[in-house]
Each structure stands twice: as structure tokens, then as C-alpha cells.
Image: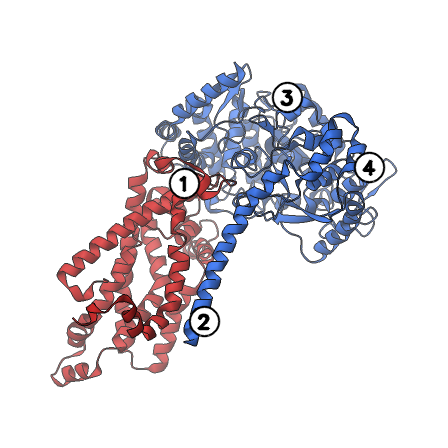
Amino acid sequence: MEKSKLTFFQKVKRYRTLLLMCTPAIIFFLAFSYAPMPGIYVAFVKYNYRDGIFGSKFVGLNNFKFLIQSGKLLELTKNTILYNLAFIILGNVLAVFVAILLNELRSKWFKKVSQTMMFLPYFISQVLVGILVYNLLNYDYGFVNSILTSMGLEKWGPYSDPNVWPVLLVIIYLWQQTGYNSVVYFAAIMGIDQETIEAAKVDGANGFQKIRYIILPSLKPTIVILLLFALGGIVKGNFGLFYNIIGTNSLLYPTTDIIETFVYRATITEFNFATASSVGLYQSIIGFVTVMVSNFVVKKIEPDYSLF
Amino acid sequence: MKKKMLALLLATSMIGGLVGCGGSKGDAPAGDSSTGSTTTDNASTDNASSGDASADAAAIDTSEHVVINYMVTGDKPSGDAAASLDEMMSQLNAILTEKVNAELAIYYIGWTDYLSNYNLTLAQMDGSVDLIGTASDWLDAWPNAKNGAFLELSEDMLKTYAPQTWASVPADHWDLCKYNGEIYLIPEDNYAQWTNHGFIYRKDWAKEAGLTDGVKSWEDMTTYFKYVKENMPDIIPWDSDGTQYAQMASGWVASHSDFVPIDGLSTGGLWGGTKDDLYTIVSPFYTDTDMMVEYAKMMKEWNEIGVWKTDVLNNTASSNRDDYRIGRVAAEQHHTQTWTDLCSATPANTIYQDDPDAESGFFYFGEESKNVVALSITHGAMAVSAASKNPERALMVYDLLRNDPDCYKLFNYGIQGVSWDVNDEGLRITPEGYNSDTQNINGMTNWWWGRNDDLEIKDATRNWDAIDALYAEYDSIKIDYPYGQFVPEVDNIQSYINNINDVHNTYMKQISFGLYQGTAEDIVAEYQAALKGAGIETVQEELQRQFDELYK
């Protein structure tokens, strides 16, 4: 009660050490997230190099027109969201699973090696991933097809079959991201009070019971917070992954076209900042709304787990 | 406290940095608005109208030594190549310094994603480039002019600072470089070249395939590919990459109609007129269903023959042209200018050394229908950046590079005796010890915006008999590009065009490589319905309205 009566300056004085430690982060966000924000205005002008962002002609929502006219907005948003849902849900489930497995490993040496092995794909550039996948899967001289042919089986042509890509892309995503994502959960598991676990053991809990009743509940806050963060980007597609693997293979668009790849293709030829920004704004607004709503819901159910 | 001070310092320096950025951006327009009335300009415009060019040149204040940055698409040379370029540049800069007290530096826009990087560099407007090589059909010249990236070149400026160029370009050519009454581009209008596309193929193999006159139609091309595939197991008929579809489709249309597309409006030239009715907008891709179905069928046949690799759409790194030079593929799709290289027995084209019978023919799109349009004079053009701090000197440098024989030869061919020489017949040859990897200056300066036939020296290695014969054939059937003066106002239809582009690219890739599912009729119907949905009729009406305003 007393705290809330403090003036702003008194608060600053009281929490100066904390504030000081926050300063780099605060400056970072001010400089890179808040300062450029007025630039959003570019989404509403006909941008002219000489007049600059604020001197160019105001055109209202004109820049948003092409997204709607394409008639693809719904389909693209749907593709983007479905892929992201698959990435977020499967990604987190698998990450938790892997983190628990790692935790159960007794051999320290093996634990370190497998953690490193799983971590490595995260550092491979998406461009290289695209090339790797192409060399594995392409029809004429791909690795998979060479094996199939040598076994006397028929060749497999994923690059001309749109239906296999949702599965393939999710697998590739999981291969690349799981090692990295599991680190956070692994750290959370390490943070669980060992006494609780030992007490459970004394009470006769077996391995599965330990996981079910102690580890998973302790991970819940972490899972919820990571999910909330991820939801903010639910309409932001993973351009690097999609563009490098699918490229401009139009045969595969029906199942692999997301907002980013469509906008890239449609506007790459004319270099229009304004249109690009309008798309970015559209995605940010949906992301903002999603985060606010889901945070609100989480707060209703379990206030401690909400972000703010 | 110390840390706090440090943080504060950091914060202020960052904010200072931001303000600094804003400031320099603000400067650019101020700088260019003054160019119209700089002191040097004022001093000389008075004599410009009356006096001759040399008198003007003498009156121009060139006391300050400046560096002119010339922006060009191309990969920056490295290693020994860079060394020979530097050597040439130092000789050239000595001349430029003596004549106009300026030196030239080349600013490269690498080929990877060149159009994005090109436009991005122009959008910076920070004065880092002065002379800009541009093109109305392949380098977004008009969109950039409209976006304010290029400086308006007043007649007085051109007369004063680029007098020889001004005199050599006829008035009607200058008219084609105007937008809203202002000149933005200096055209490369005195250089004979053909950039109409077609298939380059092995004429000797075509004869073996029974095509005694060579390939004369798309059907002959089918015969040729079939022959190659069946009889030469080691050779890929055409190792195409996934980007060739647009040229193939417009090539098919050129060969089967008298359609004349408008340049630079959309990928693949979807709109245009017809030879007998130039100013009524049509789009055969959209209306001529039978023609497109025929196309889809033939491309499916090619795909089944195995002309290209199965995963051609994901094939981005094909080295087909270099493979053609060494005989690993049987065809290349590109323009006439490229054929003039590939049909000649240059050191790089080893097929002619390996096989004395080797011969390269060219099947040009539009051959069947005699539908060939001459190159627009703004296929290569020079512009001056609106943010340039020295636009006057930039023009003076351009004038020398385009018209001064010494500068021209240095800049285009390199140092005589090192990179090139002249033989007894007056043709250009490569001297003893010449290394095409490191001493090919022509391939480094990429001067495609002011070549000049008055100063060109014919290349002795070129197969001039074949080239001249084809050029004569072109001259007998060509029409001039009719829409040079048409700079469409696309603000209101750009969103439709973007979507139509995407539809065209999406479907044409599948059609052009025969990789569609279902029948040819189905895919063409689907394509045309998608075009309609994306607003092709709206765009056509708007273009027609602008055509009527301009031409009627």
C-alpha cells in the first residue's frame, strides 16, 4: 500500500539498481521498436524517394487494396496460421518431451553429446537447409531417389506433389528447432526443487509418476509463457524456411503459400515500401490482438501465468 | 552512478545517431533542388543558347576535383581482374582529371537479386551514386523516375555539360526519354543490337535430325529435342532453370500472332497491340484460348521427351550457357546478342575447337509470323541521380565516356595492347598473352548505357557472316517499338497488376514446363479465369483509356 503512494521519482530512486540493469534493454527497445514506430505511416502514403515518408502523398488504405483484391488473403492467412499452429504445438510438445528425456539420461557424456547434436541444426542457415532438402529429395539425382532406384523401387517426386509438403515442412522445422527449444524447458526442469522429487521418490513414485505429477506441472508456467510469446507471431510466416525450400515452384503453392511468400512474389518486381509496410502492419495488428486476447483468457483462468 | 552516466551517454549518442540519419536524408532534397540553379549553371546558361559547345565548356567551373560514382549492374571483379580494372581506371581517370577535373568510380550492383538491390540503392538517396545505368524494360527506369530517384535533365544542362551527346541524339529520341515533359534518360540510341529472344541450337545436329534448313518453328524445335534426347544420351537437351517460362510464353505468342507487347508493365508483357492495330489493347494470353492450349500441349510433350530436368521449377542454379559452350547441352534460350557470342569461335566456346562441324543456329521467337520488334532505345540509358552532388560533372564525364574515342576505348575495351588490339583488317583482336578471365575489361565496366557505333571496333572473333545475315533478315521484317512514348500511370491499377503478375507467374510456370495436372484445356481455362479474377479486364480498360489520351 505504501509503495503505491510513492511519487514517480521516489520509485525511480528506490528501484534504481533494477532500472539500471534494465537500461540496455530499455534503450534497445526504444531505439529499435519505439523510435521507428512513426514510420508505420509509410503504409498509408504513396512513397516518393525525394519527399520522404512524411512528405509523400497520403493515400489512406490504398496500399492495403492489393491484398484484398488478390482474393487470396483468407487462404494465405489460413495457411500461415495452420502452419504456425503446427509449429508451435508440435514444437513445444516435442521440446518438452526431449527436455524430459535429456533429464532422465544418466550418462553425462551421452547427455552432452545428444544435446549438442540436436542443437546443431539450429545454426544451419535456412538457405543451406533449402539446398540440403533439394539434394535429398529431387527427382533426377536426389539422395532418396538414388536409394529407391538402387533398391529397384519407383522414384518419388515430392517437388511435383503439393500434398506431401505440410508434413515435410513440419518435419524440417522440428528437426531444426527442437534442440534449441528444449534448452529452455531443460533449464526449467533443472530449476525444479530437488527435494520435492526426492520426497516423491520416498513416497514410492515411479519414473512416470514423477514426470506426470511433478515435472510437467512445474513446467506449466514456462509452457504458457512461451505459447503466449509464440502467439504474437501467429500470422507472421517463416519466410526463410518456406522460400528456401519451396522457392518459386508454383506447383506447390496451394499447400505452401503463406502471406510472406505471396507478398514477396507479388511486390519484388516493383519495390514498393508502402505495400510491404501495409502487409507488416496487417500482421502486427492481428498478432497484437491475438496476444491481448489470449493473455486476457489466461489471466481469467490462472492470473499467475499471464504475461501482464 | 558511473554506469548510469555511461548509459545516459550511450542513449544520447544513439539518439544523436538517429537525428544524424534523419538530417542527412533531409539534406538530399535540399542538395538537388539547388542543382537547377547552381552558380556554375547560371554562369554558363547565358552562353549556352548562343555560343558553341567548347566555349561553354571553358566557362564551366571545374576547379574542385570530384569523384563521380557510376552505378552498374554486375559483379564486382576481384583478384587479378580487379587489378587490371584498376590499371585501366587509373589511365582513364588521368584523362578525366585533365579534361574535366573529375574521376570515375564504379559502384557495382551484384547479379544476385540485382533488381531489389538496384532499387534499394536508388532509394537511399544519399548521394553515393551519380551516374546510373538504367533501362525502361529491365531496370525499372520509369518507376524510379516517378519515385523521384532521377534528376530532371534540362535542355540547358544537356547542351552545356553533355554537348556532344545532345547533338548526336535526335529530337524525336529525346522525346522518348521524357516523362511529364522532362527528360530523365539519355538513350543508347546509336548502337545496333537485337535483344529479341529465341532458341540457340546446334545447327549441325539439327541437320542430322533432318532439319536441313535448321530450326524454323516450334515444331522443328520438338523434332530437334527429340533427336538429341534419343541419340545423344550424355547430353541434356536444355538444362533450363525455373525462370525461363515468361520468355518462352511470350515467345510462343510472338510466333503465333502479330501481338506487340508493351515493355516494362508486367512480367511477360501481357498487354499490347497488334501490328495492324497498334493502339487497341489486347492480351492474347487471356483471349486466345486455342493458342494457349496448343502451347500447353506442346510443352507437356517437351516435358515428356525430357528436354529439361524433372524438378526444373526448383532448379535455380543452372549453368546452361556455359554448358552450351562446352557441348554438354543442345540449346540455350536467350537473345540475339547472346547468340552472336555463342555462334562465334571465341576461346571460351570450345565446341568449335572440339568439332569442326559445329555450328550454332538461332530460332528467333516470331520467326514463323515475321513478328519482330526492334529494340526500344531506352533498353539501355543513363540517368543522373537526384541526390547527386555533382550532376553537372557527372554529365561531363558521361559525354566523354560516350563520345571521346580515347575514353571510350579505354572504358569499353581496356588498355590497347593488353586487353585488346587491332588487326590488319581493322578488327578488334585479343593480344598475345591475353587472359579472358582477368583482362576482359568489357565484362567489368558493363557500359550498356552509352555505346556508340561510331567508336565501336568490330570484334574479329565474332562470326560476322552469320550475324550480318541475321541482322539483315531482321531489318527486312522488323517494326520499330511503337510505345516508346507511353509511360503508363499505374498508381490506380498497380495492385491489380501485382496480382495479375502473380497469377501469370504461377500458372505459366506450370504450363511452360508442362508440369500441370489435368488436361491442357483445363489448366488454360483455370489460368484465364484466375486472370479475370485478378482484374485483367480492369487493367485493360484503364490502359486503353490512357492509350486513347496519348494516341488519339
Of mark 3 and mark 4, the one earlier in the sequence is: 4
Give coordinates of residue B142: x percent, y percent.
Answer: 55, 33
Of mark 3 and mark 2, the one earlier in the sequence is: 2
The chain carrying label 4 is B
Residue B478: mark: 3
Placement of A170 over or under B373, stated as above or below: below
Given residues B57 and B91, the one toward you in this image is: B57
Classify mark 1: helix, strand or loop.
helix
The crowd level at tag 1 (other Cα within 10 Å; few <14, some 14-19, many 20+) is many
Which three-letter amino acid code belongs to the residue tagged 4?
Leu
The crowd level at tag 4 (other Cα within 10 Å; few <14, some 14-19, many 20+) is some
Classify mark 3: helix, strand or loop.
loop
Of mark 4 and mark 2, the one earlier in the sequence is: 2
* Of marks 4 and 2, the one in the foreground: 2
Which three-letter amino acid code belongs to the residue tagged 2?
Leu
Question: Are marks 1 and 2 in one subunit?
Answer: no
Which residue, as the protein is rendered here, is positioned at the far bottom?
Answer: A202
Residue B519: mark: none
Q: Going by the image, does A86 lie left or right of B160?
A: left
Per the model, the C-alpha gap separating discs 3 and 4 is 28 Å
User: Which residue is label 2 attached to?
Assistant: B6
Are circles 3 and 4 on residues that touch, CB within 8 Å?
no
Placement of B419 over or under B339, stated as above or below: below
User: Which residue is label 4 attached to?
Assistant: B427
User: Which residue is label 1 attached to?
Assistant: A275
Are circles 3 and 2 on residues that touch, CB within 8 Å?
no
Classify mark 4: helix, strand or loop.
loop
Give the colour of chain B.
blue
Given residues A177 and B3, the one toward you in this image is: B3
